Amino acid sequence: MKYNKEEVIAAWENGEKVAGVNPNLWRKDSCGAWIGRYNFGDQKSQYGWEIENNPTARPGSKVTLRPFQWKNMEQKSLGIPGCKVTSSGMQNVEVKEGFSLHS
């Protein structure tokens, strides 16, 4: 699905801010994986991310669009529960099966 600039910004704003880290450049997804502001749609970067249109949000709510690290979004798209990637320090790492979302 294609998203316009406003939708990309809205999704970014729903990413988790981390104390001590510039929120204009870095955030985390609901799995705890780092995403880079300028890595939207970049599946060659460990910080690349995609947008989920959150089916549990009320229409028109501010959390309708959420950012997910691209491997986590790929897993969700395949209907596989849990997270594939989280973080360790400032790096993203793949996790074992059964790891669930932070929120």
Image (cartoon, rainbow, N blue to C red):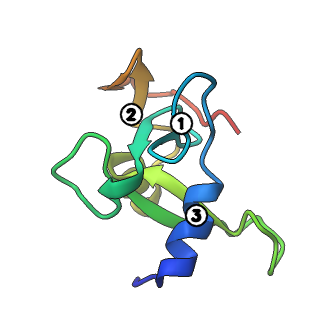
Residue at x-position 47% and y-position 37% = 83
- Check the image and report above or below for 80 versus 63: above
- Side of 14 relative to 72 (left or right): right
Query: Do the residues under discs 2 and 1 have CB atoms within 8 angstroms?
Result: yes
Q: Residue at x 41, y 44 (%)?
A: 35
> Mark 3: which secondary structure?
helix
Q: Is residue 100 left or right of residue 55?
A: left
The count of marks equals: 3
Q: Residue 6: horizontal and vertical position, in percent?
A: 56, 79
| Residue visible at 37% across and 21% down in the picture | 90
40 relative to 60, above or below: above
Quadrant of image for the C terminus: top right
Asked if residue 53 shows in the view, the reply is no
Q: In x, y percent, where is residue 17?
A: 63, 37
Compared with residue 31, is residue 77 higher up or lower down, i.e. above or below? below
In what element is the residue under mark 1?
loop
Say which mark, if any, is on residue 85. 2
Q: Position of residue 30 (x, y in %)?
A: 59, 41
Callout 2 environment at 10 Å: few (<14), some (14 to 19), or many (20+)? Answer: many
Work out how far the residue at label 3 is from the one at label 2, CA to CA, in angstroms.
19 Å
Q: Residues within 10 Å of mark 3 (few under 14, many from 20)?
A: many
The residue wearing badge 3 is 11
Look at mark 1 in the image and give the residue it sits on.
31
Give, as a three-letter code, the residue at label 3.
Answer: Ala
User: Which comes before the other along the chain, label 1 or label 3?
Assistant: 3
The residue furthest left is 44
Q: Identify which residue, 20 or 35, lies in the foreground.
A: 20
Q: Secondary structure at mark 2?
A: strand
Name which residue lies at 53% across and 43% down: 29
Which of disc 2 and disc 3 is earlier in sequence?
Answer: 3
